[in-house]
């Protein structure tokens, strides 16, 4: 008597607990891949947006014109633009209120730091889920394997003679749970490490821009004060 050891049949013949473990792991894997593809698109857009905005910003254009362009819906596509917009908006508002130079620069920098925090939070979306899947899926799969093997050996209790043919199906269906656990965990771990690295690189890029833009604002204020003193003299 031959035994059907195809994967589909093994899954169908598995116990309810093992089947639930397989469903959970399969669902986690599908959601992980959806999150991975979404994050790939998010980081590509962020990189392209940052590069395009930096090229426009360092081309030597007027800050007001760059700000106006960045506020257009078709243009505001990157985190760097939003950080710049938050800083320049506060800079302009404080200048209209005739605040002193240190307060103007400090307020603009704090506004950019708040915008940076929002961008970092956006970049880290779904990363905790990937980390959770990567760290727990092997153990969930191992639980399904242990449960399946335990049931396989318990089923042998009432048999007079145990052969490999009687044990193999139960062990094979249990090992599928381990395979699914690794299938869900490995891509999630790789993606988490990769995205975490890219998030750190983008955050550093944004922080460098904040420091450079703050220096430009300080220089802009000092130049304006110097011109005002010349005009008064």
Image (cartoon, rainbow, N blue to C red):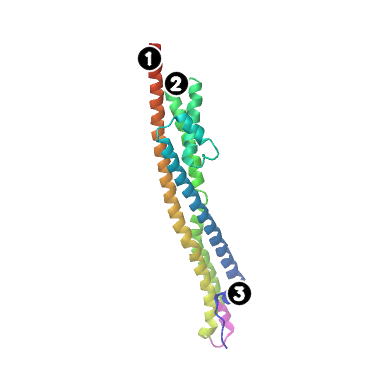
Query: Please, what secondary structure does the residue beneath circle 3 have?
Result: helix
Quick check: 171 left or right of 200?
right
> Residue under circle 3?
12
> Residue under circle 1?
230
Q: At x 45% / y 52%, what residue is drawn? A: 195
* Residue 86 seen in the current view: no
Of 115 and 225, the residue lying toward us: 225
Sequence-wise, the earlier of marks 3 and 1 is 3
Residue 190 screen position, x and y as percent = 44, 58
Q: Which residues are magenta?
A: 152-161
CA–CA distance in space, label 3 to label 1:
87 Å
> Residue under circle 2?
100
Query: Please, what secondary structure does the residue beneath circle 2 have?
Result: loop
CA–CA distance in space, label 3 to label 2:
74 Å
Sequence-wise, the earlier of marks 3 and 2 is 3
Q: At x 54% / y 40%, what residue is drawn? A: 74
Q: Quadrant of residue 202?
A: top left
Residue 156 screen position, x and y as percent = 56, 82
């Amino acid at each position: 008597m031959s035994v059907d050891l195809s994967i589909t049949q093994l899954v169908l013949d598995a116990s309810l607990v093992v089947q639930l473990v397989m469903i959970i792991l399969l669902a986690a894997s599908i959601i992980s891949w959806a999150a991975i593809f979404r994050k790939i698109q998010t980081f590509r857009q962020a990189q392209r947006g940052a590069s395009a905005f930096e090229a426009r910003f360092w081309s030597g254009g007027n800050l007001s014109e760059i700000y106006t362009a960045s506020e257009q819906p078709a243009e505001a596509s990157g985190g760097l633009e939003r950080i710049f917009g938050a800083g320049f908006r506060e800079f302009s508002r404080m200048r209209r209120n005739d605040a002193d130079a240190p307060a103007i620069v400090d307020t603009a920098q704090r506004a950019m730091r708040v915008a940076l925090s929002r961008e970092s939070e956006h970049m880290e979306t779904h990363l905790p889920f990937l980390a959770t899947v990567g760290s727990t899926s092997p153990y969930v799969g191992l639980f399904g394997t242990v449960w399946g093997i335990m049931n396989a050996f318990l089923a042998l209790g009432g048999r007079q003679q145990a052969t490999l043919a009687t044990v193999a199906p139960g062990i094979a269906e249990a090992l599928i749970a381990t395979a699914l656990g690794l299938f869900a965990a490995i891509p999630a771990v790789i993606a988490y490490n990769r995205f975490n690295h890219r998030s750190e690189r983008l955050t550093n890029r944004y922080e460098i821009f904040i420091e450079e833009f703050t220096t430009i604002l300080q220089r802009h204020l000092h130049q304006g004060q110097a011109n005002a003193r010349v005009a008064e003299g």
